[in-house]
Each structure stands twice: as C-alpha cells, then as structure tokens.
Image: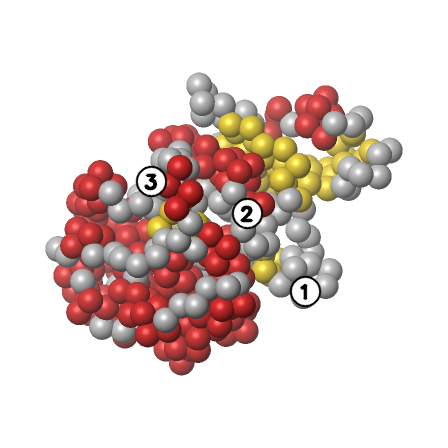
Amino acid sequence: MGPDDINNERMSELMGADVTLVTTSRIGDGLVGLNLRVGLECADPAVPSSVVIKLPSLDETSRATGMALRNYEREVKFYLGVADTVDIRVPHCHHGEWHESSGDFILVLEDMAPAEQGNQVTGCSPEMAVAAVEELAKLHAPRWDDPTLDDLDWLGGRSTPEDIAAVVGLWAMFLPSFLETYTHHLDAPQLDMLNAFGERIEGWMNGRNGPKTVTHGDYRLDNLLFGDGTAAPRVTAVDWQTPGHGSPVVDLSYFCGAGLVPEERRTHDRALVRSYVSALGIGGVDADEAWVWEQYRRETFAGVVMAVIASQVVGESERSEAMFAAMATRHLQHAIDLDSLALT
C-alpha cells in the first residue's frame, strides 16, 4: 500500500461519504512510516477538511523493519484497542487496518494542525518539557499496574528472557556499524560509558522492577506535536509504533535525556521528575518520588540502546544521522551526569 492507492474512491470508502481529494502532501520524516496530509471536500459536515494518513515506509529497509518488529501491527491495535482507555492526547482515529498476510496497514487520523512537531535535533525549552512529561503521566496513570494488560500479547517492552536475549544480540550485532558512523560524534567519556554499559546490558534489563503500565516506547520530540492549548492541544503524542507494557519511567528518562540539551537538562532533571510525579497524583497514582528518581537515573540507558539499534535498522539520511547523533551523545551524557552505571 502506498500513496498512489490514496484516491477519491478509496477515501470515500474509508470516510463513509462521497469525498474528493484536493491536496496531498508529505509531512514529517517518517523513518518507519510514511505520513501524508490529505485535504478533502465533502458535502457531509461530519467529514473533516483534512486528515493525516499513515502508510508503510517507501524505503525497503524501513518497511522491512516495520513489519519484522510488528510496528505497523502495534500502531493500528493501539489506536483501535488502547487509545480510548488512557488520557493522553492522541489524534482521533477515523479508520485503521492492518493486514497480517501482507504487513500492509493504513491509519486515517485527525489532522492536528496548527500544532507543530518537536525537533529532536535542536531540543526543546524547559516549558515544553514540563508540558510533555505532564502529558506522559496521562498515558501511564489510567492503567498503572493494570493486570489486564498481560492479555494484550502484542504489546512490546516486556523484559522476558526472550526479549532480553534479543536486545543483547542486536546490540552485539549493530554496535560495530554504529561506531563506524557515530564515533566521531562522541567524546572519550561517552565512548567509555558506551563500552562499559554494553558489558552490563543483560543485567540492566534483568534488574527492572516496580509497577508496569502502558508505555509509548519512543516518547521523544519528533513524535510530539505542540500547540498553544486553544487552537491545538498543548501536547499530542503520535507515532504509536512501539507501545509496550513495562516500566513507566523508561518513557520519562528517555524523553528528558534527549529532549533537552545537556546544559538545560542538568538544571531541570529534578524539577521534571517532580512535575511527572505530581501529574501522576492528579491521575490517581501515588508514586514515591525517591523511587521514580532512582529509576529515572537507571533508565538513562534506554535511549542509548535505542540510538545504537534503531540507527542501524532504518533508512539513512542526513537528518537521521543528525537525530541519532543527538540522541546518542545526550543519552550517554545523561548517564554520565547521573552516575547511572552505578545502578546497573
């Protein structure tokens, strides 16, 4: 399924009304999926004037990754089965399909314009970071330690022996090629931290404990849309290709570690954790701030793992290298600043 399949007939079928396409444009970088903004004309006032359509990536490597890692399947199932059970702001899903035999999928989503996408390369302001972590708590709180999540076997992020073995194997496989591309972006302490952590990755994953909930799995600036709170919500979370059932603090540390440049993040680490804990309280979860802080320090490495592995399984571009370089350097510096290795 690709952009050429999006025509008047197909859109009329998906929207349940006679519609005419008036504009089609690509939005975002879409490392694993392809995002299109489609302008519509329709006599039915219930049909919006524009929607965002998400399709498999046109890049063969990225498409193969999306299928192999079940990204396409999980995103459709999140929108159809989980989105309405959590409070985080996500685009309304007008239609979703995933075909197991071909791996194809399509999502027709609410267009969140004039909200603007965050920028993982440049980072964000402390004010944007506070809004993002408060919104994150609205994902985690509603299904905090919910045992029924065990029944959703398509959710990822679980630290089973098989999952741990897979991550350890992928790390060993991809670290050499990662270093070929990204070593020149890293300073000596960051390289030392990368190598030291690689020797402890299995114990680090085995050591996770505490409550579990629905997680985003890739909660970062490129996957967040920011608005003024009136014409568009303050924060909308998109790209639900890696939803999981695991430690909530992974999302928190992952966002903060690369969302802010290190100079800003050092100043605001503690305050952001407090904002998150306070927002959980509003959602009915009484979390111990000391425990959250310890887990926050420990989970700085989640971003390191993502940078090493994900950078090697998606299509390459100048933007993707800049993004993964920013992630790798910032997450490693986060681990250095918080002495995270001591908790592995």
Q: Considering only vertical position in the picture, is 229 above or below 175?
A: below
Instruction: Work out whether residue 16 can be spotted.
Output: yes
The amino acid sitting under disc 3 is Val
Which residue corresponds to the image point at 87% horizontal and 33% vertical from the top-left?
43
Q: State the residue at coordinates (40%, 80%).
A: 267
Q: Is residue 124 above or below residue 177?
A: below
| Residue 137, x across and y down, in percent | 49, 62
In this rendering, which labeled residue sits more in front, label 2 or label 1? 2
Locate residue 114 relative to residue 131 in the image: left or right: right
**Residue 23, x across and y down, in percent:** 73, 37
Instruction: Residue type at mark 1: give it.
Output: Gly
Q: How far apart are the two marked residues, 2 and 1, measured between alpha carbons? A: 22 Å
Q: Which residue is mark 1?
A: 229
Per the rendering, the mark at residue 85 is 2
The quarter in which the C terminus is drawn is bottom left
Q: Which label belongs to residue 313? A: 3
